[in-house]
Image: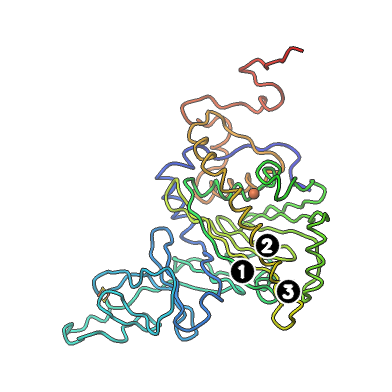
Amino acid sequence: MFTHQHHLRYLLRSEHYTSESHYRTELERLFRPAWHPVAAASQLARPGDFITFELFGTPILLRNMDGELCCFLNVCPHRHARLSDRPKGRSPTLRCQFHGWEYQKDGRTARIPEARLFRPWDRENSCLRKFRVATWGEIVFVCLDRAAPRLSEFLAPLPESWGRCFEPPFRLAAVYHQDFACNWKVVIETSLESYHVACLHPKTFKECPPEEVCDHNLHARYSSLRCDVPQDYAGRFMNASVRMLGGQAVTKKYENHNIYPHVFFARMDVYRQVQIVVPTSATTCRHYSWLYTLWNGRRNPLRWLLARPLQGIVVHVGKQVFREDGSIYEAVQRGIEASPFPGVIGAREERIHDFQRFVLERCGYPVGDAGPGAPWINGAAPVSDSAFNGECAACEPTRIRP
Ligand code: FES
Ligand SMILES: [Fe+2]
C-alpha cells in the first residue's frame, strides 16, 4: 500500500533544477558527505587492475595495490599530469604517464627517474592524495570527505543482508553508463515512481503493479518499494530458472531502495542492480549501472546452458529499461525550465515528495517555503490546490459535439 491516499505538494522549483548556486549547495551538502558506488570488486580483482573516472570534477584513480583497493586523486605531484588517462587497465606499477614517477600504496614515491635532480627532496609535497574506499559485499564505494560518517552509517538502515546479495551465485553481467542533458534529480525522480510504467515501458512491463501488491517505505534518508512480480509467462519462466539454477529461494518479489541522494539498489530473484546518478553540472548528469545475474553455471553444463541465455535476457531487458527511461529525461528538463505550473505529486509518486523534502532539508531550506505561495518560474502565479479538485479555473473545457 502507499503511505498517502491523496496528492502531495511538488516541493522543488525550476531553479532547483537549473541554478548554478543551488547546484553548488547540493555538491557541498548532499554529495560531499556521501559514499559513491564506483565499481564491482570483480572489476579490480587482480593486483595492478585499475579504473579511472571523475566524481564532481575530481579525477580519481582506483587501483588494486597488491590486493588492497586504494583510491587516489588522479593527479601527479610532480607537474600535475593525470597519472593515467586510460578508463581501465592493468599495470605492474602505479606509474605516472608523463615522466614515469612510480608510487606505492600509501601514496609515497617508489621510484623516480634521475632522482638526484630533485635534491633536496620535498617529501611532504610528493605524495599522492588518497580518498576513503570501502566495500559492501561486492560493491566498491568511495567517499571524498574525510569527516563523513562511515559507509555502514551512510547505508543504514538498509539490512545487512543486502551487502551479500551481490555475491555468488550472482555474477557481474554488465556495466553501462550514459550522459544526460538534465539535472540529476530528473533521473532520480523517474526511478522513484512506477506511475510512468504503462506509458514509458508498455512492452517491457506492460502495466503498473496495482497498489495492493506494492509497499512503500519512507524513511528520513531513504525510501523503498517492494512489490509482487506478476506471475505471467515471464514471471513463471524466472521462477523455473531460479529453481533449476539452485542456491536461491524463489520470492517472486521485486525490491528497490534509494539511499538519498543518489544510490539505488534493486533486486529480483534473477538479478541484482546498483545504480548511481552523478551530477556533472547544474543541468547535466551521468547515470551508471552495474547489473548482476543469477549464474551458478560453471560446475554443471546443464545449468550453464540455462544461465547463459538467462543472463542475455536480463541484460537485454535491463538496457531496454535504461533506454526507455532515458528517452524522457531531456523532455522533462526542458519542460521544467519553461513550466508555469507548480507541479503535483500523486500518491503512487510519494517517494518523490520524500526525496524532495530530503533535498530541501539538507540544503538548509525550510520545506514549507517551497510549497504553494512560493514564486514559480517566469513570475507565474502558483496554482492552488483547488485546481486539482475539478476543472482548471483558467479555461473552459473543450467539448466535442456529437
Ligand atoms: S607529471 Fe608525473 S612524473 Fe612528471
Ligand atoms: Fe522506468
Amino acid residing under circle 3: Leu
Ligand 1 positioned in quadrant:
bottom left
Which SS class for mark 2? helix
Amino acid residing under circle 1: Ala
| Nearer-N-terminus badge (3/1) | 1
Q: CA distance from mark 2 to mark 3?
A: 15 Å
Q: Do the residues under discs 2 and 3 have CB atoms within 8 angstroms?
A: no
Q: Which residue is mark 3?
A: 305
Residue 164, horizontal then vertical, whole percent: 67, 74
Q: CA distance from mark 1 to mark 2?
A: 9 Å
Taking the image as shown, residue 40 lies to the left or right of residue 236, namely left
Residue 66, horizontal then vertical, whole percent: 46, 86
| Nearer-N-terminus badge (2/3) | 3
Quadrant where the image shows the C terminus: top right
Residue occupying the point 62% across, 50% down:
191
Residue 156, horizontal then vertical, whole percent: 63, 65
| Nearer-N-terminus badge (1/2) | 1
- In the image, residue 278 sits, relative to residue 144, either above or below, namely above
Q: Which residue is mark 2?
A: 314
Classify residue 271 by image quadrant: bottom right
Compare residues 68 and 271 and report the one nearer the observer: 271
Foreground: disc 2 or disc 3:
3
